[in-house]
Amino acid sequence: MNKLFRYKERGSSLLLEILGGIIVFLAMVYILPVNSITLSDGGGNYQAVFIATAICSGICCLIMGLFANYPVALSAGMGMNSYLAYTVCSTMGYTFEEALLLVFASGILFLILTLTPLREKIISSIPKSLKYAVSAGLGAFICFVGLKSGGVVAIDNGLISLGDLKSPTVLLSIFGIILVLVLMQIKGKVGKLAIVIAMGVTAILGLILGLCGVNNMPKFEWSNVWENYGAFANNFGKCFSKENFNVFLRPESYAIIFSLIFVNLFDTTATLIAVGKKVGILNEQGELVNGKKAMLADSIGAVICAPLGTSTVTSFAESTVGVESGAKTGLSSVTTGLLFLLATLLYPIFSIFAGVTNGLTPVTSLALVSVGCLMFSNLKEIDWNDMIVVITTFLMVILMVLCYSVSDGIGIALIAYCAMMLVSKRYKEVPPIIYGVAIFFIINYVLKIII
């Protein structure tokens, strides 16, 4: 195993890699029911999407682990599934199968982009300080997702406020978050395994409270596995039906494809940079070592998701949960992938970590909050003497959270960065490709306004 994954060279061990993969899976397993619910709102079949998401996630994690040897897990992107269900299908009137065909087209173009030097050049061209800003911003975003999924903060009519402290679920989330933050301060194995210990304690406590009559506590949920597989078989490859190809006659379809490509590009870039720094596979120039293989792995995932019947797959920020627990190689991703495949048969066993009846996930929320806090420390690496970098970093962090989008935070911040560098006559310090990316983001936003 060490010859294959070289975890000893990276300062890890077999146990830490497997534990890291398990923790990442537990932090990501919520995507199975959540993605199924979201895409069913856009016309998908819940059971079919559930199996498709699990299989696609498993395959992509195995590719990333075995081919690229990166501790990065992949699954259906949360932002893109909502975009497909509520914008493309519900608002713009596309059928679910038509939307999947557009996802497939964007995946093919994304793979072509990856096979050329362009994608790698985009990542390499991002200034070093801004790479750390991306990582810190991603930490803030992950923390906010955790607080929201745990009910600690709530969004009502667009306003963010403190959650309902009368809710037992919210109180359980707060307990878990405080527990993991306290355990992280203990030196030794307890501190390194703080996340898995806190998740286990919180899950057991919630189960006990539920058995005692407390409402909306984590519990085991049972489902008919063979019915799920039957629905998946009926929907496999359905997006390639002849009538769906008329979708390419609609001009707005190309704006959708463009949006899917760029959201995937920058969501994945942010995750790879964040994980790369933690694992130590960023060189002195801030470039990913062996990054081409990692990018190929996630771009292949973007192609296979639509035929299987789910939304675009992307590298998940939750991968950093495993990295913080000690995982540093692809063995962690392989473990996560095998668990995703196993979940198609044994999901009820893992369901206690996935969610509760009111949609909150107190067990996994603590993992996201703790990792977000740790990633936020990357702010110390930026150049605080450069006011343009400071302003850009602030915009990136705050907009990732408030827009609830990693790609929008990066896009708007890069547009502002280029504008400020031009006005201050420092335009030569900005690589040409960054100007190109900023222009593409501007075009993307203009198309959103027009269509």
Image (tube, rainbow, N blue to C red):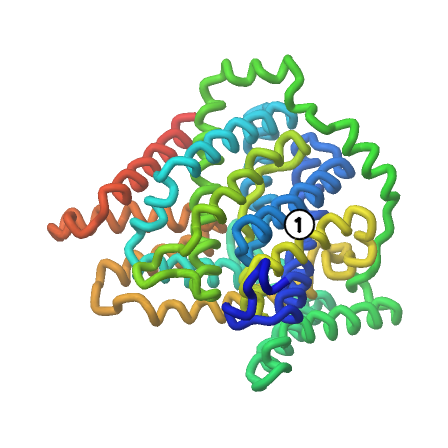
Residue 37 seen in this snapshot: no
**Left or right: 92 with respect to 227?**
left
Three-letter amino acid code at the position of disc 1: Ile
Element marked by disc 1: helix
**Left or right: 350 with respect to 180?**
right
Image spot of residue 199 (x, y percent): 69, 70
Q: In this view, does 302 lie above or below 423?
A: above
Foreground residue among 423 and 288: 288
Q: In this view, does 143 lie above or below 158?
A: below
Residue 433 position by quadrant:
top left
Image spot of residue 217 (x, y percent): 78, 64
Foreground residue among 282 and 264: 282
Foreground residue among 374 and 64: 64
**Residue that mark 1 sits on:** 31
Q: Which residue is drawn at 59% across and 23% down?
A: 93
Residue 184 position by quadrant:
bottom right
Quadrant of the rendering where the C terminus is positioned: top left
Q: Which residue lies furthest to the front in this view?
A: 3
Q: Residue at x 66, y 65 (%)?
A: 18
Q: Is residue 194 above or below residue 339?
A: below
**Left or right: 228 with respect to 421?**
right
Category of crowding for the residue at label 1, using alpha-carbon neighbours closer than 10 angstroms: few (below 14), some (14–19), many (at least 20): many
